Amino acid sequence: MPERKLVCLDFDGCLSNSTRAGYNQDEFIFEPVNGVGKWIEETIAHHDLIIFSARELSTLGKQNLCTWFKKYHLPEIPMTNIKPPQGHIFVDDRAYQFTGTNFPSVDYISRFTPWNRVQKQDNIKVV
């Protein structure tokens, strides 16, 4: 049986269809991203999954997140507000994959927009 890997999943913009920044622990008003329930079920059958969020995950924040999962019939998943360093892969709407030499250009950084804030992103050259 293959080794189980730790998949680290961002909440806002990956699990929930959040469209703006500046969240607080009480603001769980966004719906799930299409297809996320099926993806979670398939992933946890083969790997460990943890949610990380920049939200303040106080007791109330965790309760609200658990309520959000129940509302949308999603399995509860362990959560943290710190990116786990032992993660095998990070699923994040604000991520950029660095491959050793492809630092993002200043233009790319300036123009970067998460998927849920634009209809179509221009082709941006990375140097």
Image (spheres, rainbow, N blue to C red):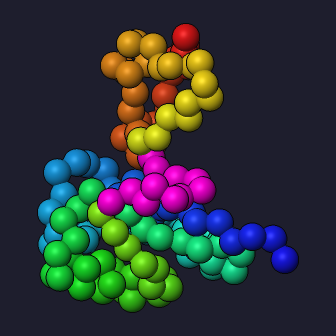
Residue 63 on the magenta span: no
Residue 17 lies in quadrant: bottom left
Magenta span: chief secondary structure: loop
Residue that appears at 17% across and 75% down: 58
Residue 114 lies in quadrant: top left
In the picture, measured across the screen, residue 113 lies left or right of residue 5, that is: left
Range shown magenta: 82-93
- Residue 69, position as x, y percentages in the image: 39, 82
Q: Quadrant of the N terminus?
A: bottom right
- Residue 18, position as x, y percentages in the image: 33, 56
In the picture, measured across the screen, residue 15 lies left or right of residue 43, that is: left
Residue that appears at 31% across and 50% down: 19
- Residue 57, position as x, y percentages in the image: 22, 71
Residue that appears at 34% across and 69% down: 80
Residue 86 on the magenta span: yes
Q: Nearer the viewer, residue 61 or 50?
A: 50
In the picture, measured across the screen, residue 42 lies left or right of residue 93, that is: right
| Above or below for 79 versus 100 | below
Q: Is residue 10 visible?
A: no
| Above or below for 106 versus 13 | above
| Above or below for 86 versus 110 | below
- Residue 95, position as x, y percentages in the image: 46, 40
Q: Quadrant of the C terminus?
A: top right
Q: Residue furthest right?
A: 1
